[in-house]
Amino acid sequence: MIEGRGPLRSAVTVESTGRTCPAMPRGDGMHPGGKVSKASSGWARDCLLACACAVPAAFGAPAPASPFDAGAREVLHVPSPDWRDQVIYFVMTDRFDNGDPRNDDQGSGEYDPADNAKYNGGDLAGIRKRLGYIQGLGATAVWITPPVANQWWNPRVRYGGYHGYWAEDFGAIDAHLGTLDDYRNLSRALHGRGMYLVQDIVLNHTGDWFSYPHGWKQDAPAAGFVLTPDGRGRTGPARLPFSRNDARDPAQHAESIYHWTPDITDYDDPEQLIDYQLAGLDDLDTGDPVVRRALRDAYGGWIRDVGVDAFRLDTAFYVAPADLQDFMYSEDADSPGMVRVAKNTGRREFLVFGEGFGIDRAYQDVQERRIEGYVRDAGGRPVLPGMLNFPLYGSLSDVFARGRPSAELGDRIRTMMARHGNPHLMPSFVDNHDVDRFLAGGSEAGLKQALLAIMTLPGIPVVYYGTEQGFTGQRAAMFARGHGSGGRDHFDADAPLYRYLQRAVALRREHRLFSRGTPTVLKENAAAPGALAYRMSAEGDSALVVFNSSDREALLDNLETGLAPGTILRGLFGISGTPADIAVGRDGKVSMRLPARSGSVWAATRTVAKPAPAAALLALSALPDHAFDGDFVARGRAAGMSSFLLVADGDLATAQQVQPSADGTWRATVDTGSMLDPAVPHELVAWSETPGVTSEPRRFRVERQWKLLADVADPDGDDHGPGGRYQYPGDRGWRDHRQLDIRRIRVSAAGGALKIDLQMHDVTAQWSPPNGFDHVAFNVFVQLPDRSAGSDVMPLQNAGLPDGMHWQYRLRANGWTNSLFASEGASATNEGRPVAPGAGLTVDAETDTVRFVLPAKALGDPRALSGAKLYVATWDYDGGYRALQAEAGTHAFGGGDGRRDPLVMDDTDVIVLP
């Protein structure tokens, strides 16, 4: 069992090894004397909280291999760590810090810190400069976006390659980021601190130099082929064989270094996924021996020449598993695969984890299975050691940001462990560069919960730069002169989220149970936000992790701990402070109050106290199997108490206080007004905090009737913005479908809940969006009759509500996000206060209808809906509202100025409910 311990510094008996820690200066206040300490218990060599020279181990386990073991020197090549124990800090290099302003502007119009589409000035020297900040967080590895030379500016899409994923030369450093020596110096500096270097790589594509704007013929790929010069006049990569990119040249066409193909239009077509262009990027034929060898040579060079310790592989879904196996395991003596290259440098556990951007909807595992197919192929042969855990990310966001029932995360934990052969090598994350920041639609309280979850579940936790500073912008800069920085640096080690993450990372690194253990879900709420509890177990040790994902106090009842009655659970960690110790009840169960948005961790000890004898009785009679169509009466018996609480779905805020009659019987009416989905099971329990008794839970279902309040047609073809002057983006994904055209809106109510059906001109799912629709974002504004004035601003859309309407609640949803906001704090530049639970969302593709269901709790339990007002507007959203410019671009709307013109393509009239 894990014994509870105090702060890390007092958790072990320290003996000086006499070695100097390379990570911290002497007398820095966090690492006394700069000496490495050794635990006499044998379970840790530790440089205290802020130092990653060695990862603290679980009790009795040896410390993992560390470059420190070879002495405190800066070297390129170090042994691989046990990756399960690492915590990765992910940096978008151009947006992190500017260590050398001399390389900022390369004179091609590609550099402008005021423009989010252009280079901002961050570089490799900037990362090296901030390693103390990163290590102080507790991170043990740094993942950087691709440092290779990139296409600096793409005039076709009016965007720059600052991010690193548009390679021009796979074997050279991008001039904006520094030199090869800068990269080596970063590697040495990391290794000297006992840290590791993770490089992002791309096999699937280069930059975007050719396209088929006027059509494509499969049997004649030279027809319609167009080369597009970049900002420097270049029409292709600099190095062979990738420079052979002109399909009009018969020799280059025959070499087939590229798939001469247009963009993917059907993401369900396996041939298109592998052979067609992803978002216009020139697709490499990774099955060709020449291409394979060139890629192995380029990326093997980064391991040999720079000392890279791991790769993150971009767009893995778009490369055939056989091609990835060649990249990893080729036995070519002159051009070996990455495993052999790494072993030749002393790295026997070289980690490569792929990106498979696939998010499953609740209780589905299609993407989980697909992701696992890139770890082991259909024949069981290894492909990649790990994959990013996108399905877990989706469930974390749904539960902790959008207020979905906690059982959705419980189910994801179960399927994650069942579907994946090695979930401990699957990096887990809350934010990254391709998705909305958690705080763009969720609360800080929810973010802390999501971060605690990835620190206590299997997987390698990844912290995206800026999360620890409360960033809401997807790719905002950390340094003062960069875009979105607000004109100041953001390397504040005293920031509340930075300090919180220090504690959460330390919890994981102190107790290997969380990096090595297996979770068992013990409690979850299928109907609403609320309790979620799981036990982490490894080699006889166990810990209990408990969340309340609700914004209201919740009841954790009848938790089957699997531990002996009377076992003492010692508080290890709490979001708001270390929780008090608790004892397992005489039945092996635990019941307790959970504060709103809490997260707590207890360690099971070997201490067992004798449970107190039962002094009271509380029983809840069985409920009928049929669904209730309204409120109903619950009955039972009680003894030894004057009153107790009757709690539905764990919500203590709406619990009834019940007083038993003189003969011990009791009855109470259960309010079902907020229970909307007949498929969802609800739970009722009777609970008395004193003397501490809980009834057996009873499940039931409710099927309420919806009443249609409004049915309004919207004109066909009015999806062209104010005055009809806007154009759709040039990409056929919009042009051929007009997904932003609203055709009809129907509004229904059940109690205080609203159901909003939006019938569109067309609903598509071209990009495999988890919400079931894409190429449109909906903005739904709700004004309630019994509330304060609210706001008349349409945040971030350069517009205000029509007809004097003021909203208290606003829904923003696209294919990947579904966020609800209250009007407090809303402005032209602020979306307002995030609200949970969010809206339920379903899609009927046959009728082109998107349905949103706003439960009464999401709307603050309105007393009445008569007189409520609704307004709906469409645009598109991709980490921010999609650009509007004078002329439509491939992925930008045309006909206006996005800095000041309304970002509204179609909208409804203001609808007043009767």
Image: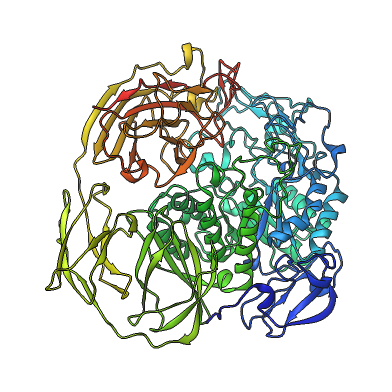
Q: Nearer the viewer, residue 287 or 656?
A: 656
Q: How is colour applied across the structure in the image?
A: rainbow
Please say if 581 is above or below 426. below
> In the rendered image of this protein, does residue 687 appear above or below residue 232?
below
Q: Residue at x 86, y 45 (%)?
A: 179
Q: In the image, what residue occupies the spot 36% across and 34% down?
A: 787
Residue at image position (21%, 38%) is: 706
The C terminus sits in image quarter: top left
Looking at the image, which residue sits at the far left? 663
Q: Position of residue 896 (x, y in %)?
A: 57, 16
**Quadrant of res 15:** bottom right
Residue 703 placed where, x, y %?
Answer: 20, 48
Q: Is residue 110 left or right of residue 267?
A: right
Query: Residue 791: x percent and y percent?
Result: 45, 29
- Residue nearer the viewer, 687 or 296: 687
Tell me if residue 458 can be seen.
no
How many numbered marks, from 0 up? 0
Residue 240 appears in the picture as rendered: yes
Left or right of 291 in this view: 220: left
Where 347 sits versus 496, above or below?
below
Between 277 and 851, the one nearer to me in the picture: 851
Nearer to me, 378 or 540: 540
Instruction: Give x and y (percent) for residue 295.
Output: 72, 49
Q: Residue at x 81, y 44 (%)?
A: 172
